């Protein structure tokens, strides 16, 4: 445990020195909500297309999911790719540090940033646009934790195999944009065709948006959405540890 904490502190310092990662991981979700609500006409008005909800209501859970996807798929894989490219992982191999500890340290760092980013986004939504505070806080926290774990597991898997910084970025981005599509970034899940929504429910980010939205607005998240995220966390996380390579 002591070794994991030391790794976590070291990774935290390195993350804080990267202004781009800090901006997109920490500030961007809340800033996106603020920009959408203030500058897009009708974004703060009820619409029949969304069953009486406002676009800002629908995009608030999505902003949280966007922050998780950015951290897990855009920021995390290149870090491990860089470590592998420059032989840092090869040197770690000569120490007692198990790959699971390194992956766990990354998970702790990115998870902490995700929690702060989510708090900022919720505060923006509640204070600037009168979005209600999450009505089912326990379910909201559970949905968010599972969402973070499932998306980060995918990022860790990419990072476990990426040979270089560039390959980590490329593979992560190749997953990132389809994930955002199925999460409803361009077509809100509320107005997706049934078939497309079913596919969305089978992705961790699609299930995350639905579960977070349900808990936020007073409903119990469906067991299907929670189980999908749990399955990605367990299966993909296990594979990430098993296939991790030092060189």
Image: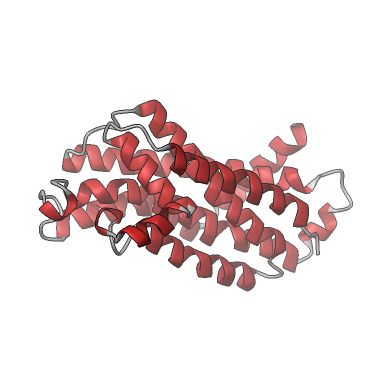
The answer to which quarter of the image holds residue 144 is: top left
Q: Residue at x 55, y 41 (%)?
A: 230
Number of marks: 0
Question: Does residue 4 appear left or right of residue 132 in this picture?
Answer: right
> Which of the colour schemes (rainbow, by chain, secondary structure, one colour) is used?
secondary structure
Question: Does residue 44 appear left or right of residue 126 in this picture?
Answer: left
Residue closer to the observer: 185 or 196:
196
- Whether residue 26 is visible here, answered yes or no, is no
Tell which residue pokes out farthest to the front in this image. Answer: 195
* Image coordinates for residue 107, horizontal then vertical, percent: 61, 44
Compared with 15, 220 (above or below) is: above
* Image coordinates for residue 162, horizontal then vertical, percent: 68, 66
Question: Does residue 28 appear left or right of residue 7 in this picture?
Answer: left
Q: Residue at x 19, y 52 (%)?
A: 55
The answer to which quarter of the image holds residue 193 is: bottom left
Q: Residue at x 37, y 41 (%)?
A: 212
- Whether residue 155 is visible here, answered yes or no, is yes
* Image coordinates for residue 56, horizontal then vertical, percent: 21, 49
Q: Residue at x 81, y 65 (%)?
A: 247
The answer to which quarter of the image holds residue 77 is: bottom right
* Image coordinates for residue 132, horizontal then vertical, percent: 22, 34
Q: Quadrant of the N terminus?
A: top right
């Amino acid at each position: 445990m002591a070794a994991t904490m030391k790794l976590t502190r070291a990774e935290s310092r390195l993350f804080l020195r990267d202004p781009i990662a800090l901006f997109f991981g920490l500030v961007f979700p809340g800033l996106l909500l603020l920009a959408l609500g203030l500058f897009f006409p009708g974004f703060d008005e009820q619409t029949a297309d969304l069953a009486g909800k406002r676009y800002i209501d629908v995009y608030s859970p999505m902003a949280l999911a966007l922050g998780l996807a950015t951290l897990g798929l855009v920021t995390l894989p290149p870090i491990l790719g860089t470590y592998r490219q420059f032989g840092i992982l090869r040197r770690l191999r000569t120490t007692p540090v198990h790959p699971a500890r390194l992956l766990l340290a990354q998970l702790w760092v990115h998870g902490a940033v995700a929690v702060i980013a989510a708090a900022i986004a919720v505060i923006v939504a509640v204070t600037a646009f009168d979005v209600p505070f999450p009505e089912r806080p326990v379910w909201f926290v559970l949905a968010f934790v599972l969402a973070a774990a499932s998306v980060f597991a995918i990022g860790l898997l990419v990072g476990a195999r990426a040979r270089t910084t560039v390959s980590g970025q490329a593979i992560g981005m190749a997953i990132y944009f389809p994930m955002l599509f199925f999460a409803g970034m361009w077509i809100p899940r509320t107005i997706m065709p049934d078939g497309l929504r079913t596919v969305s429910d089978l992705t961790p980010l699609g299930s995350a948006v639905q579960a977070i939205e349900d808990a936020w607005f007073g409903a119990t998240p469906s067991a299907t959405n929670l189980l999908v995220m749990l399955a990605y966390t367990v299966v993909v996380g296990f594979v990430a540890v098993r296939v991790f390579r030092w060189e």
